[in-house]
Amino acid sequence: MRPFLTLVALLGLLASPAAAAKQCFFSYVEFEKAVPHFDIQTCPGIALAADKGFCRLSLNGDSVRIYRFVFVDKEACLDQVEAMTFTDFVKRFGASYESK
């Protein structure tokens, strides 16, 4: 029973916000190797300063994914993935892209 309680306590520590803030579950280095994508200058619909993070975009058929990375201890870590159809992407962000 004691090993089980120790395991539960360790899992509780790993799930704490302080522990989660220090971990990078999917780094940009891993993403770069594994996911075909486009490098984009700004994040669509997200005001994200360049020193805080960046976005990448991928297309697969009529599906668009926006990947947001934020810097955690100087490492770029995947923070959010937003998926939508290409039609919804164009309705939301427009048909042309301009770097700002």
Image: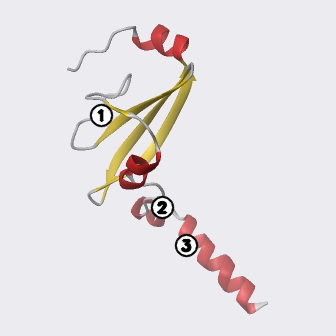
Q: Name the outermost residue toward the bottom.
A: 2
Q: What amino acid is at disc 2?
A: Ala
Q: Secondary structure at mark 2?
A: helix
Task: Kindly identify which residue carries mark 3.
Answer: 13
Q: Quadrant of the C terminus?
A: top left
**Of residues 43 and 22, which is closer to you in this image?**
43
Which image quadrant is residue 10 in?
A: bottom right
| Marks 2 & 3, CB-CB < 8 Å contact | no
The label on residue 48 is 1
- Residue 20 to residue 62: above or below: below
> Residue at left 46%, top 54%?
26
Q: Nearer the viewer, mark 1 or mark 3?
A: 1
Counting from the top left corner in percent of width and height, residue 91 is at 48, 8
The label on residue 20 is 2
Q: What amino acid is at disc 1?
A: Leu
Q: What amino acid is at disc 3?
A: Leu
